[in-house]
Image (cartoon, rainbow, N blue to C red):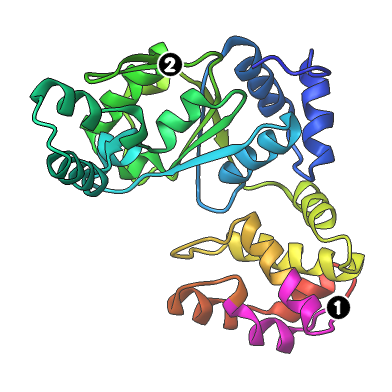
């Protein structure tokens, strides 16, 4: 995909920031190369650090529709690429028989006509120009699906036996995400531009919160960001991501808070921590001292 006004990484950064998505130098370069070289971006990191949001931001920045494929254990080509609408085919066959049509070749040709094809996300992305394809949590799929995905992304084409080869007029921008629940094969990674998503530092995370939630007071945003940064330093089962920081600030704002104290922080821990053990550990922290360090 070639997009007007995106002729350098800096221009990509500016366009993404206009959508509210802040990128560092490495990610800006990866996005620019993905647009210029038609290479997928493989985004790896903990949940909630902005991998999925990148695809949405790219779609908004380029004016292209976002097509999402959510991976899961056991997913196969019929769920990801295409399938035939068997109930409609059966109805058509019965209608043809009722009309006295007995030509087997004609019936077979009609049954496998394009009108009976159900397009799944991968085929939709190949046939939609332009488009942004998000293959979310590819680490949840199995080895066979990875191999199939590698072949499709190498050629941006697929062969349907009954219809022939369908090829993308222009390759979609592809974003693959992985929470690293298992290692994805090197062959797929080599096909992609790689970017590791780490938890941001305080200043960057605060900037993200302020950009996403401009209605939240600066004091509240600073306090929530400081609390989340402190929680990540603990040995938690599931450290909170940026998404949880935004959720927490939004929840506190919905409660009418312009700042937060230890009591209110504990009462709203369910917005940021999703395991009982993590919540218990957080309640044992000196949240007042953490907040005092931010000038509370």
From the top left corner, tell me how far across and down residue 248 is, in percent: 69, 71
- In terms of depth relative to the viewer, which is nearer, 232 or 104? 104
Magenta highlight on residue 264: yes
Asked if 226 appears above or below 60 in the picture, the reply is: below
Of labels 2 and 1, the one closer to you:
2
* Magenta region includes residue 110: no
Label 2, label 1: how far apart the Cα atoms are? 51 Å
Q: On the rendered image, what quadrant is the N terminus found in? A: top right
Whether residue 187 is visible: no
Bin the neighbour count of mark 1 within 10 Å (Cα to Cα): few under 14, some 14-19, many 20 and up. Answer: many
Q: Position of residue 130 (x, y in %)?
A: 62, 24
- Magenta part of the protein: which range? 250-270
Q: Nearer the viewer, residue 64 or 284?
A: 64
Residue 189 pos. (x, y %) = 41, 22
Residue linked to disc 1:
259
**Residue appearing at x 65%, y 55% in the figure:** 242
- Residue at horizontal 66%, vertical 32%? 64
- Left or right side of 52 for 115: left
Q: Determine which residue is flagged by label 2.
A: 156
Secondary structure mostly taken by the magenta-highlighted segment of the chain: helix
Q: Residue at x 35, y 40 (%)?
A: 139
x then y, percent, for residue 10: 82, 21
Above or below — where is 213 with respect to 87? below
Mark 2 residue crowding within 10 angstroms, few (<14) / some (14–19) / many (20+): many
Q: Is residue 180 visible?
A: yes
Q: Which residue of the protein is positioned furthest toward the front in this rendering?
A: 100
């Amino acid at each position: 995909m070639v997009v007007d006004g995106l002729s350098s990484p800096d221009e990509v950064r500016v366009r993404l920031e206009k959508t509210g998505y802040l990128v560092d130098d490495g990610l800006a370069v990866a996005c620019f190369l993905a647009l210029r070289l038609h290479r997928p971006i493989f985004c790896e990191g903990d949940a909630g650090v902005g991998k999925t949001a990148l695809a949405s931001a790219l779609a908004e920045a380029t004016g292209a529709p976002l097509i999402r494929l959510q991976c899961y254990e056991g997913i196969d080509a019929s769920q990801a690429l295409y399938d035939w609408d068997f109930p409609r085919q059966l109805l058509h066959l019965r209608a043809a028989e009722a009309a006295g049509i007995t030509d087997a070749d004609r019936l077979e040709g009609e049954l496998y006509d394009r009108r009976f094809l159900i397009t799944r996300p991968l085929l939709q992305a190949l046939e939609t120009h332009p488009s942004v394809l998000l293959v979310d949590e590819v680490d949840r799929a199995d080895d066979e699906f990875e191999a199939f995905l590698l072949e499709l992304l190498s050629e941006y084409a697929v062969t349907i036996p009954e219809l022939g080869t369908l090829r993308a007029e222009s390759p979609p921008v592809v974003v693959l995400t992985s929470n690293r629940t298992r290692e994805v094969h090197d062959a797929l990674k080599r096909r992609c531009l790689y970017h590791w998503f780490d938890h941001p530092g305080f200043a960057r995370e605060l900037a993200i919160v302020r950009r996403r939630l401009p209605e939240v007071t600066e004091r509240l945003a600073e306090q929530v960001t400081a609390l989340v940064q402190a929680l990540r330093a603990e040995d938690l089962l599931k450290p909170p991501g940026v998404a949880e920081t935004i959720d927490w600030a939004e929840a506190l704002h919905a409660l009418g808070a312009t700042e937060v104290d230890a009591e209110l922080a504990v009462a709203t821990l369910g917005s940021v921590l999703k395991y009982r053990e993590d919540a218990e550990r957080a309640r044992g922290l000196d949240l007042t001292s953490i907040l005092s360090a931010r000038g509370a």
